Amino acid sequence: MAGPLLPVADALARVLAQARPIADVETVPLREAFGRTLARDLEATRMQPPCDVSAMDGYALRAADLPDERARVLKIGESAAGHGLTKPLGHGECARIFTGAPVPAGADTILLQEDAIVEGRMIGAREPVQPGRHIRPAGLDFRPGVAGLRKGQRLGPGEVALAAAMNHAHVPVVRKPRVAILATGDELVLPGGAPRENQIVCSNPYAAAAYVDGAGGLPIDLGLAGDTFAALEAAIARARAEQADVLVTLGGASVGDHDLVQSALAKEGMTLGFWRIAMRPGKPLIHGALGAMHILGLPGNPVSSIVCSILFLVPLVRALQGDPDPAPDRIETALLGADMKANDQRADYLRATLARNAQGALVATPQPLQDSSLLSVFARSDALLVRAPFAPAARAGDPCQILRLSRGGI
């Protein structure tokens, strides 16, 4: 007996429970660190800003020297970024100052240039001046010895910039998980070939590799394997030789006469975790372990394979790098753009487009065609509209849950 279908949340929990973070650490130049995961906390080695600096263009002075618009102070010099005024300001003195420039000793405020009265070297203020205005104090951003970035953080553009500002030319990162990707099926040919009438061009490995790369892993192409035990066993041997942390198979995960993947993996010694999930598309997904190598057997239908990559493969790759929150990207709330029928026992992940209504609310409209073979529909979609098992019928305008397929646009 196949047994009941496993809920999506339970399946993900099982996948992540087996994911022990990789212990291998690499030190890479900062220019190569984008998308990598920190292996240790990264502390600031300096203070930023290193001294009190001006946040605006204007005049550095003592607020008490300009009690009203009749008072004047004498400009004795200027302070620019990288070229501060070394002479302290005395009573009744000021300095022209520019954004990012050191605040001269003796000054306690910045008079904005648009609020200044300029009479040669004599400077006044159109409105009363308050102490402490427009000054960025030393250490406002960070101080030496304070961890600005934490172990497990993914280094995006902002994190790379912060590492640079903290004066790190190299950073310690987790070794990229090695993910071997194998497409299976006698019907497949590689892109650029000349498929016969009964063959199709293989697309799944390219999507899976893109998701692995985007999650910080290293995709390893194992090519195509036909529907024979010999071909599958040879591919599994290649995955082992590549020292893969994860083996992803694409296709052959069901139980038909030509679906040999699970049997081949079992013959090689795989410990099966689960293989059927209460979701649509993507029910026949294999999860297991072959020694230290994680196994994910994704369905062969292209959209099923992609949805399972989003829900299971990406979180697994993140977890192997020590990401403290590896689960799929945050669920968002939107409004339905169409009526929906009541759902059955399987969670639905419907391809949908996103738009804003007249009130600015996000509206998710499911595509009219949801067949799991239709990549063109997926490519035109902005999000997956998530319908829980046994969700009741819903009307256009009701709240719904979505997973974005990209972060741009709406």
Image (cartoon, helix red, strand yellow):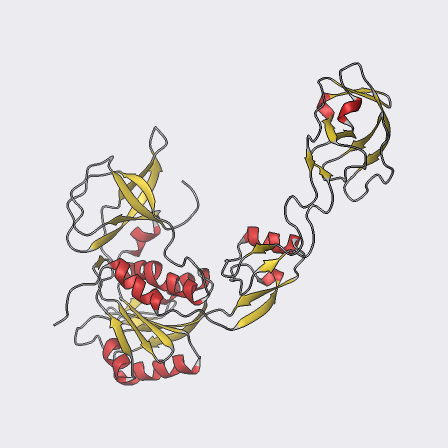
Please tell me how many numbered marks the rendered image carries: 0
Residue at the image position 19 percent from the left and 52 percent from the top: 389
123 in relation to 381, above or below: above
Q: Nearer the viewer, residue 122 or 46?
A: 46
Q: Position of residue 91 (x, y in %)?
A: 85, 27
Q: Quadrant of the C terminus?
A: top left
Q: Position of residue 145 (x, y in %)?
A: 65, 56
Q: Position of residue 51 (x, y in %)?
A: 74, 44
Whether residue 119 appears in this view of the structure is yes
Whether residue 55 appears in this view of the structure is no
Residue at the image position 70 percent from the left and 31 percent from the top: 132
Is 236 positioned to the left or the right of 133 in the image? left
Q: Nearer the viewer, residue 249 or 370?
A: 249
Q: Quadrant of residue 246?
A: bottom left
92 in relation to 270, above or below: above
Is 381 positioned to the left or the right of 57 in the image? left
Q: Position of residue 63 (x, y in %)?
A: 75, 25
Residue located farthest toward the left when viewing the structure as drawn? 1
144 in relation to 234, above or below: above
Residue at the image position 78 percent from the left and 21 percent from the top: 66
Q: Nearer the viewer, residue 346 or 232?
A: 346
404 in relation to 199, above or below: above
